[in-house]
Image: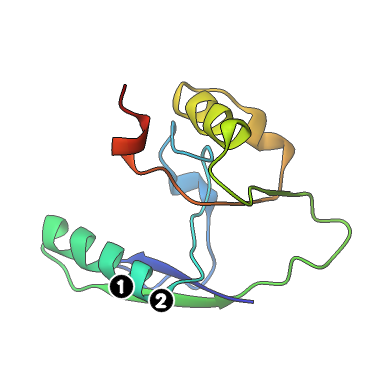
Amino acid sequence: MIVYHGSVLEIEKPNTAFSKKFLDFGSGFYVTTYKDQAERWAKRKAVRMRRSPVVNVYEMDISDNNINVLRFESENEDWLDFVCGCRKGGESYKNYDVIIGKVANDDFLKP
């Protein structure tokens, strides 16, 4: 599968050490299957940092049985609990190599 990462840097080898904590799926390297989403993210980051946007493209194979994948098919209660837990500093994301699902629209999380 082809995935994209919006940035201001060309990233040859993704490294999770640079990830922020308390993200929707925990600390990690976030990619999307939607090129336009990565382009929008890269442009926002470029404006903020006064740099040029870069969309990195990777081929990712998750068919290996040794890769532990968590997949959220929809934004259901399990997804919401997971996202809220990660945003509060929970570390259940560390049980997985790959987490697939939508990131939260913060309007959705507001009471």
The reply, left or right, for residue 109 in relation to residue 53 is right
> Which residue is depicted at the point 24% across and 72% down?
53
Q: The disc labelled 1 sits on which kind of residue?
A: Glu
Q: Amino acid at mark 2?
A: Lys
Mark 1 lies on residue: 39
Q: Position of residue 104 (x, y in %)?
A: 41, 43
Can you say whether 74 is above or below 76 in the image? Answer: below
Q: Quadrant of residue 6?
A: bottom left
Q: Quadrant of the N terminus?
A: bottom right
Q: Which residue is mark 2?
A: 35
Q: Residue at x 85, y 65 (%)?
A: 64
Mark 1 falls on what kind of element? helix
Residue 63 vertical placement versus 30 (above, below):
below
Residue at (44% x, 45% y) in the render: 19
From mark 1 to mark 2, how far is it between C-alphas?
Answer: 6 Å
From the viewer's perspective, tell me whether residue 103 is left or right of residue 72.
left
The crowding category of the residue bearing disc 2, from other C-alpha atoms within 10 Å (few below 14, some 14 to 19, many at least 20), is some
- Residue nearest the observer in this picture, 56 or 109: 109
Quadrant for the C terminus in the image: top left
Image height of 92 relative to 61, above or below = above
